[in-house]
Structures are given as C-alpha cells and as structure tokens.
C-alpha cells in the first residue's frame, strides 16, 4: 500500500467510524436495540464503500461533512444486509469479521429488528443532512433505494439464494453480483459524484469504473474463499466449495478467475484515465481491493 | 357506517390498491420476490392508514395522485412490519388476515427479503413522486424514517418483545403502542397535512388527534382479541390472554379498557373540532376504527 493511500485510509476510517457512531448514538431508541445496531457497525469492516465516496469527493475537491454522512449511511445499509444475510433462515453464519454474528449475541428477533432499523434510519439521515439541497438529497435517496432494494442488493440476494440450488452460468453469476454487491458499490461511487454536482459525462465514466471494479472485488472475494484462511478472513473460509456454490473459480478455474479479475481491473482503470483531475487515490483504492488478502 | 364514509372507503380503497400494485409491478426484480411482496400487500388489510392520508387531504381539499402514493407507501411499510413480525423468531404467526403468513408460503428467507425490499422501496417511491417539491419530499422521508424506524415502529416492537417477559404498567404499555402502532398512524395523518402545506397550528392539532385515535385504535385491538372470534379477525383470537401479554383489558379490566377507549376517542374528536374546514370524514373514520369488530 502506498503512503498516500495508507494516510488517506487512516485519517478517513476513523472519521467515518466517528460519524457512524454519532448517528446511532443520537437515535432515541431502546438501549438494547441501539446496542445491537452498534455491535455490527463496530465489528470492524474495511469501510471500502465509504472510502470510495471520499475518494470520489477528493477527485472533485469536495470532501465535506456530508461525504462522511453518505459514507456512514452506506455502511449502515451494508451492515443491515450482513445482519439479515447471517440469520439462520438465510446463510446461517455464526462468525462475521472474526466475531459472533448479531443473532448469536442478541437473538434472532433483535437482530432482524436491528437490521430493519438501520435500513430505515439510513434514509432519514440522508434527508436530515445540512449542507445539501433538497433536490440533491432526493436524488441520493432515490439512487440508494434502487441500489439497496429489490432492483439492487435485495434482488441480488434473492438471485443468490435461488442460484444455490443449481449451477449458474457466467452471465447469471454476473447478474447476481451486479445486484448483490455491485449496486451498493456503484452507489458509493456515484453518490460522491452527485454530492459534487459532477457532469453527466463524469458520472457515466465513474459508473463504468464502478461496474468493473465491483466485479473485480467480487471475484477476489471468491478467490480469497479458496486461498485465504478463516483467521485471515474473519469468517469461515472454504465455505463456497463445501456448499458447491456457483463462484468464478468454480466456473472458470482458479487461474481463469484471476485472469477475469485482471481484465475487469484493467477496464476499470482505463475508465478512470478518461477523467480530468487527480485520480491517484481512486486508482490506489481500486488496486487495494483487488490485491487485498482479507 | 354512514353513506358518506362507505362511499369514501369504496372509492378510495380500490384506488389505493391500484396504486400499491402498480408500484410493485413497476419494480425490476426477480419474479419470486415481487410475488412475495404482492402476496402480503394483497392480503386485504383495512387500508386504515392510507384512508387517513386521504381524509386529511380531503379536509384541505388536496386529494391528488400523490395522496394515494403516500398512502400506498404507508401500507407498504405497515405490510413489511407484519411480514417480519409474523416470522418464527418474532411472533411466530401462521395466520394473518385469514391467510397463511408470508413465510409459510414463501419460506423465511424470502419473507425476510420481501419485508426488506418493501421497507427500502417506500423511500424511493416518495423520492420519485411527481407533483411534490423536493423540500416536501425530504420532509416526508424524514418523518417516515422516524415513524417507521428505531424511534418509532421498530423501537416499539423491541419494547413489545421486552414486555412479553413481564407485566407492564399503563405508562409503559402506552409507550409500546405510541411507538409500535401510533407512530405510523401519526405519519398517515401528518403526511396529509404536509402534502397540503398545512399551518404549524393545524399540524399540531392533527398530531394531537392522531395520538389519541391511535391509542383508541390499539385499545380496540386488545378488546377484539377478547371479544372477537378468529374467523372475524382473520387471525388467532384470544392469543393475548393465552400468552399473558400486557394489554389494556389485563391492566384495567375489560370495562376499564372500554372506558379508556371512550376517553381517548372523545379527546381525539374534541381536537378535530378546533380545526376549520369539513371534518366529517375524519370524524367518521375515527368512529369507524373504534367501533370496528375486526
């Protein structure tokens, strides 16, 4: 990791975390609910999505309080989806980021409700931002609703469950990932552009970047499930093979998956090169997530 | 029921239903997910909350397409909360409105995701309304997020689960209901006022009305659980007594609960009388929900 990226991550992850905790702390709600919400938010994710909001904001010289707020909101949506995905009726995972999952600690009912609360809270937080016009808030809320809902993340999760029963082909697998994880990553990148009043052309380029880096990110996830250890990943490794899940390595072989990752990564970077402005941070962040080992 | 109210309900319930189905139909999502969303939305609720949006809109001569959209959104939030509440890890109900509950038909995973999708979709639908300014949309989204989330409905559900373990006192019981069911009913009434650009004073009066009619509504629910039959209610009657749940009749006796209901009803109506404009519909709707037998 370069010094620039390291410094950028160190400074901003603590600011993002602060913003997240402050948002939940200010909610007037039963203590056990707040505790359950905090628990999974604190569980130490990589904060990749908020970092993309900030890297895009940096590109447009537009890092401000609201960049952190939007980043925090994305992390809240991401966290709610993990809480619900881990439930016994879904993926039935006991371990997440090296810690017991939400329902293991708080019970299924409270875990379900903590997820629901984070989902609902996210939209309110966007609506209450200070230095953003109502029109921009409405645009962000609309984009987030599409990215996180039936047309995006939730729809992708349905396709994913559906795909467990049979072997998907490459096109179907891409569709799962574009929705399940790609849509929210795309929102992270696009929201930074919306906050900065970027041009249509700039947004189009960034969305193209988001598409390819999102797929690269997911392929790396699949590769890590094979090459990583449970300790490294903070979750059970080798689960995909054990469950005969449709993955890139399963469809393309491990080498083929690595080639595919490289392809998407290179198209993503080529998209960025079309932009004016300093793309160093975005490039380094993209490189970081495809080279990561956890 | 008066002819005015009957006509109002007949005309508007079908329009609300149409709006709801159109919203879900237009979502680009996996078919099984849409089917699960439709199933519970179609299950024939009383559409009380959307009717309040319309009755308040009528008071301000402001019934328009967007009144139905906001009503549909409230029904979507209400329905998602019922789907999640019915889950085995929550209330574990097999029957709702006389039909098998969502997870009985579609399985727990899809039921959880259908609820999540309805929750997320609601905010997007508000953001995409046509004839409403961005500032009004942002206000509605903020109010709905508070009403439906940790500070309202979801928080109330947590308090309710918490209360199952012990006998609540009257103050605690009111707090459960103010959050669990009152907050969304209040939003139904307040959103009609926001859509009509009502004055602060008018909103204050309507919120007072909403508070009392919400509690009256809940007390009637508790009474019906004792006096109604499962067939009438479309859900298991007598469940509260069987589970020793904290209810108004349990705390105040059945007669005491009926007196309390009358009190709240009368304060609610007295609030309405302070408004200018034709309050006939609102009064009749209020009467309808406290005299209902299902």
Image: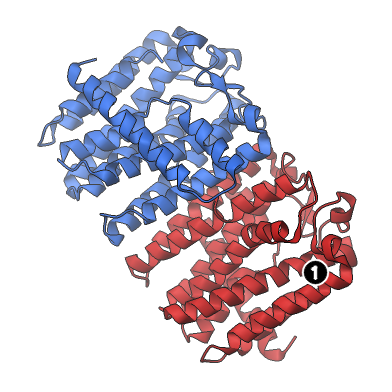
Chain colours: A blue, B red
In the image, residue B182 above or below residue A83: below
Q: Is residue B14 among the parts visible in the rendering? A: no
A45 to the left or right of A4: right
Circle 1 packing at 10 Å, graded few (<14), some (14-19), many (20+), is some
Residue A215, by quadrant, is top left
Where residue B140 sits in the image (x, y, percent)?
44, 64
Image position, residue A168 (x, y; %): 52, 26
Q: With respect to residue A143, does A154 lie above or below?
A: above
**Where B279 falls versus A17 (above or below)?**
below
Q: Quadrant of the C terminus of chain B?
A: bottom right
Could you tell me which quadrant the N terminus of chain B lies in? bottom right
Q: Which residue has dot 1 on it?
A: B294
Residue A257 appearing in the image: yes
**Along the horizontal axis of the image, is A125 left or right of B239?**
left
Measured from the top left, where is residue B28 in percent x and y? 47, 49
Tally the marks: 1
Residue closer to the observer: A86 or B223: B223
Instruction: Name the residue located 72 percent from the left edge and 39 percent from the top edge.
Output: B89
Quarter of image, res A224: top left
Closest to the observer: B145 or B53?
B145
Residue A235 location, x and y as percent? 53, 17
Q: Chain of mark 1?
A: B
At horizontal 28% and vertical 56% (from top left) the residue drawn is A136
- Outermost residue on the left side: it is A276
Q: Secondary structure at mark 1?
A: loop
């Amino acid at each position: 990791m370069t010094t620039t990226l390291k410094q950028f991550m160190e400074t901003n992850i603590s600011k993002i975390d602060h913003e997240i905790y402050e948002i939940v702390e200010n909610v007037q709600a039963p203590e056990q609910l707040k505790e359950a919400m905090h628990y999974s938010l604190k569980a130490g994710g990589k904060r990749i999505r908020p970092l993309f909001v900030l890297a895009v904001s940096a590109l447009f010289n537009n890092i401000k309080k609201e960049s952190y707020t939007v980043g925090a909101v994305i992390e809240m949506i991401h966290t709610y989806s993990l809480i619900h995905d881990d439930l016994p009726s879904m993926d039935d995972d006991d371990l997440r980021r090296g810690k017991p999952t939400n329902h293991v600690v708080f019970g299924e009912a409270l875990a379900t409700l903590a997820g629901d609360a984070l989902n609902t809270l996210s939209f309110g937080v966007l609506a209450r931002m200070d230095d953003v016009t109502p029109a921009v808030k409405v645009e962000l809320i609309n984009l987030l609703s599409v990215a996180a809902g039936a047309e995006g993340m939730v729809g992708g999760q349905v396709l994913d469950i559906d795909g467990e029963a049979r072997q998907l082909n490459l096109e179907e697998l891409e569709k799962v990932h574009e929705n399940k994880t790609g849509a929210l990553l795309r929102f992270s990148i696009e929201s930074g552009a919306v906050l900065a009043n970027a041009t249509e052309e700039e947004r189009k380029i960034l969305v193209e970047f988001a598409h390819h880096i999102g797929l690269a990110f997911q392929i790396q996830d699949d590769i890590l499930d094979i090459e990583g250890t449970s300790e490294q990943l903070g979750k059970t490794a080798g689960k995909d093979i054990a469950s005969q899940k449709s993955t890139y390595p399963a469809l393309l072989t491990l080498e083929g998956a690595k080639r595919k990752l490289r392809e998407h990564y290179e198209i993503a970077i080529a998209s960025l090169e079309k932009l004016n402005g300093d793309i160093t941070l975005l490039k380094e962040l993209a490189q970081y997530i495809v080279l990561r080992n956890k």
